[in-house]
Amino acid sequence: MSVILPSLSQEIERLYDEENGQPLVSKCVEETHEFKTQLKKLKAHLNKHIQEVEKGDDEKKGNKRRKDLVVEKLNKAHRQWDHSIKKNYKHASQQHSKISKFLQNKLHEFDLDEVYVNKLHPESRTNIDKAISFHISRYNVGSLPVNGRQEIIDYLGQVYGVTQDISERFVQLGQIVQDLKNGDTRSCIEWCHDDSLLQFELYTLNAMQLFQNGDVLNTYKYLTENIPNSAFKYRQHQVITQVSPLLTQLLLGKRADDFDNKLQLQQEKCISLFTKDYCAQNNLPFDSALFLIILSGVISFQFFTKYKSIRASAHVDWTTEDELPFDVKLPEFLTRFHPIFICPVLKEETTLENPPYSLPCHHILSKKSLERLSKNGTSTFKCPYCPVNASKAKTKKVNFVML
Amino acid sequence: MGSLFNEPSTDFHLKLNEQLFQIPHELLRENVRLVQKLIDKETQGLNEDFQEMNALLAENELDQDKVALTKLGEIIKRVDSFEKKLNKRLNEDLQLLNRIRTRVSFFQDLEDAKTLGDHSKLTQWYQDYTNLLIGDYLIRNSKIRGKELSEGKYGGDEDDDERNWNPGVMFLRQQHLEQLIDYDILLAANRISKSLTEEHDLSPLIEWIGENKNFLKRNCSILEFEVRLQEYVEFLKNGQYKNAIECFQCFLLQFMETNFADLKLASGLLVFIKSCEPPSPPSTDGIIDPQIIAGDEFAKDGNLVLKSKADVHRHFFHRKAFKSADTPTMSNAFKFNNLTKNMDFARYTDLLDAKRWTAISELFLKEYYSMYGISHLDPLLMYLSLGISTLKTKECLHEREFSSSDFHKLDGFIHQGVLRNTCPVCSSEFAPIAKDLPYAHHTQSKLFENPIMLPNGNIYDMKKLKTLAATLLRENLYPLKDNEVLDPIDKQVFSETDFVTMYPT
Ligand SMILES: [Zn+2]
Ligand SMILES: [Zn+2]
């Protein structure tokens, strides 16, 4: 649970005036406006006084008193305004100082530049630009202000410097996502495969759109006549959870309260499902390499900072020659790219030079530890994990393959 | 309250992104300071006005009262214009506070996704986070372009006082993330930096220095000195000796105590450059001052080309030198980093070198970013460096060997779909970068369920191997019998009875 977020939020709210919900400075503006109005009123009074004196139809005393009153009021208004604007300002300024302290005390902990030990070479920039090109094409192609094939390619090229060999792989993705965002499902229906889940979800989306437009009869007709053939065979669950409630609402003649929200969610569901299918079919990674690496970087950050503080207190140097000095625990979806086998004897990851070997008992060791245990193949040895005896001749080089 | 990806806590994220609050807050304070100045000035002025008015009114003369009335009219005008100025500040305040509120709610989204244990929401959040880093990188590094694209046929948002745009800003707008980055701050830095490195123009930087004198002084920055020195050097390069001397006297002399050696060198440069000028008429044809000839050993690697004052002159002033003219002018190819450092010659050429523009830009960026408490290194690069190392395994960056079969379609299916390496570190963009970074450290094996070994030594997840066999059969890609599987690597067929259960630890 976040401790900082609620208090940060609270601190920020203090920069707004409690009464009018505006920033604190607004009080100064309000006071000034009122002051101005008062001055205008008093000016009118003064003007009237002068005119009356000029006309000369007065007894002097009453006039004098009226003028004194105006002068007094003018000065009072001025004093009050002067006092309160300064007070208001002071209050605002104090709140800002408080926030400064808060940020300094609660948020300031790392110096990011210190964590960035293994700096990337300046020559890396070309490759990073390419990775960004790919990422932007993948995630932003559905948010462009243009829709035609050539226009999309040109736009990505001119604005983001994406080369055509990358952009053209995402053009259709962008076009169809844009259509879906605009509520037009035709291009996606044309693209999708028969009997796919996407097809079914698009059917639901269409029905919801019709219903949204208030066309009960058409919706009913569409729901019953256009349901994909396979729906009852493969998608009974979805029929029950998605189509049936819709039909019920239709018959009752009223939409659920959060129907707009549901429609929006259905649209997003279709976009994400389509994107998945599109990437799979075109051999494009669903998550960009850049995204996966950044995510791993964020996850590892806490380990880096922890290590850094340990290192600082132990006065050890940062040595990262070949391997990071700590184990970062990544989620499953970030570790399934390659099999990792740690030799149980040497506690080292096996490599091409030091591959894994299987013993007759089907326990596995690295080549190096095998040589060590067998004294370079000159003697038999006992498996470190079970009582079976092994000789180097009876071992077999193995190869882990991730499918 | 867990993490779904073993990702850091919301509080950790807040600390990591301190600048998202630090910058707008700094701008808010700046705004508050402007309000203070305004209030001080106007209350003072109005006090005087009121005194004058009161004095007039105290006379109790009709004429004086009339003057006082006019004075009151002026006071009202003054208050009115003050109100307008305050309103402008208020709007500024409102916008900055909106930025902060948007950011608070951005982190609230993270907190919510964590609390709900919502995978897809969390993934979406990290995608936004990645996009922010990309936006930040593009704003800092890509060229700032004129209006033509954004207002032309692509009809981008045309709101504020948009003098320039850049792909980073564009990207963030299209992703609806622009409130989450202080792009104006980054863009301003980029603009000044690019004017240095690309246009060799000091004026935007000089203006910035003027606006931030106090900060630079507090930090004992050498920026102003370096900039004025560069200005002086540029005058010299252009032969504007009078301007150079003026610049020296107005701006450089004040650094006499702190930068004496540099100033000595600078004044020496004037003499040096003068001595490089072609004497008229050219009488010393072919004769080179032996003092300034660099030894041959510097030329061996082809880097050193400047050998004499004549070369220096030709290189820096693009004029015909007085020496023999048969060496072709190839000024851009010149590199002089190998000149010995103990020679004045080298020190002068260092001063004249165009690399100084990059150095000044770097120096400026460092000061600028530190003023706002932002990392001057690109955060995107930092995360990439950490991320690549965290993902890099010993198997990465090796091409896997396949043997092909007689079945063309089968090979295509297997290489595209089954064995395709989807590792981000191994991708063509990141593999070259990953080469020089350390590997991840693992203390435990990360393999798969039900490992079985085939007679050829390949170990697979048994279920997946069987699923593959079923798919091959269904898609008519390979004729397999019951209980047969195909090894996708060497395309040999094995029977399920050949499976050997393995016990990797
Ligand atoms: Zn064993
Ligand atoms: Zn890899």
Image (cartoon, coloured by chain):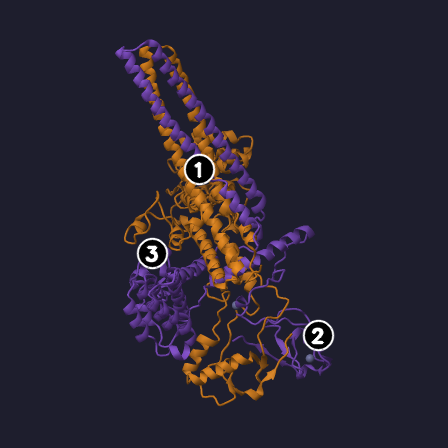
Q: Quadrant of residue B242?
A: top left
At horizontal 32% and vertical 61% (from top left) the residue drawn is A182
Tell me the tag on residue A158: 3
Against B462, residue B398 (above or below) is above
At horizontal 47% and vertical 26% (from top left) the residue drawn is A83
Tell me the tag on residue B392: none
Establish whether labels 3 and 2 are both on one chain. Answer: yes
Q: Is residue B336 left or right of residue A198?
A: right
Q: Position of residue B499 (x, y in %)?
A: 58, 85
Q: CA distance from mark 3 to mark 2?
A: 60 Å
Labels 3 & 2 near each other (Cβ < 8 A): no
Q: Amino acid at mark 1?
A: Trp
Write down the colour of chain A. Answer: purple
Q: What is the secondary structure assignment of the residue under circle 1?
A: helix
Mark 2 sits on what residue? A372
Query: Which residue, as the protein is rendered here, is positioned at the far left?
Result: A55
Quadrant (top left, top right, bottom left, bottom right) of the N terminus of chain A? bottom right
Ligand 1 neighbours mark 2 (CB distance < 8 Å)? no
Q: For residue B65, say whether it is visible.
A: yes
Establish whether labels 2 and 1 are both on one chain. Answer: no
Q: Is residue B330 left or right of residue B495?
A: left
Q: Quadrant of residue B389?
A: bottom right
Q: Is residue B197 left or right of residue A110?
A: left
Chain ID, mark 3: A
Q: Position of residue B349 (x, y in %)?
A: 48, 42
Q: What is the secondary structure assignment of the residue under circle 2?
A: helix
Mark 1 sits on what residue? B208
Establish whether labels 3 and 1 are both on one chain. Answer: no
